[in-house]
Amino acid sequence: MTSVSNAAVGAYLAGNAAAKARHGMNEAIARLSTGVRAMYGGDAGGASAAMQIRADGKSAAIAARNIEDGISFMQAGESLLLELAALNTRLRELRVQDLNADTLSAGDEAAISAEEDAVLAAGNLIDAATYNGRSLLGGNVAITYDHDGTLTTLSQDATITLTDSSVAGIDTVNTSIQVALGHMAAGLSALKGHQAANYALAANFEAAAARIADTDFARSSANLAKFSILNQSAMAMVSQANQAQAAVLAVLQ
């Protein structure tokens, strides 16, 4: 009876070892097939941290796209200011020409006046220009510029109206245009810096999350091979233990 008992214990131990090996195989297969390390309850804390890091990374990528919208908005405003500067320069030329009235005919003065009116009308159209319904030169636009949802305000409060005045008055308008262009250039530089930072953050966050949550394929492949061998060995031992138990019982009978 002792031999029968020993064979039964051996079969039980071998079966238990086979079950553990199959569990290890299934875990390795799950990790390899999904690419996720935290399978079968492994490292739940790490999985949670990786989810948050990935969420921050995706938010940083969205923030970078938000900034791209802001850059487009400000570049459109900048191009309008440059056009205003060109119109203001032409207005100054016409004003200087008109001052030479003693050498101009009535037709010349009428032509100059007509062109001045056209330049002023073009300036008014520029002042009224919009970007997706937002005034390009007369208001503020708020955008989210980081992964935490922080808002920043893009100030485009650069409403500049061309005036049919003296040369000195036109020069004052030109100075206002130059100041506004300087502010826009500074704003664009800041936005591009934030955008580059967000793209870098998005990449770093994704890499960090991958290190925490993604499967170590070399290790999991090695574990799969290891547990496959252990399972085969354990099943062979189960078979042998069962055969030994059957042989002892046959002798006793």
Image: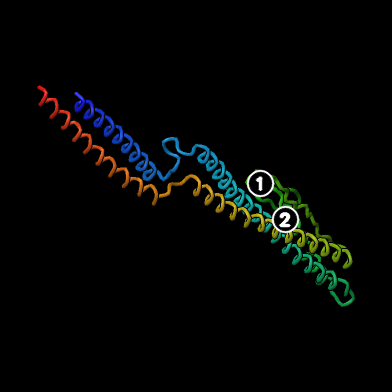
Query: Which quadrant would residue 97 be assigned to in this image?
Result: bottom right
- For mark 2, what is the residue? 125
Q: Residue at x 90, y 76 (%)?
A: 102
- Of residues 33 and 246, the one drawn nearer to the viewer in this rendering: 246
Left or right of residue 200: residue 10: left
Viewer-nearest of labels 1 and 2?
A: 1
Give the x, y percent position of residue 244.
16, 32
Identity, as a three-letter code, of the amino acid under mark 1:
Thr
Q: Which residue: 30% across, 35% down?
A: 17
- As shown in the figure, which amino acid type bears the numbered disc 2? Leu
14 horizontally vs 220: left or right: left
Q: Which colour assignment does the render follow?
A: rainbow
Label of residue 168 in the image: none
Q: Position of residue 251 (x, y in %)?
A: 10, 26
Calculate the distance from the C-alpha at mark 1 to the C-alpha at mark 2: 30 Å
Secondary element at image label 1: strand
Q: Nearer the viewer, residue 179 or 108?
A: 179
Q: Which residue is mark 1?
A: 144
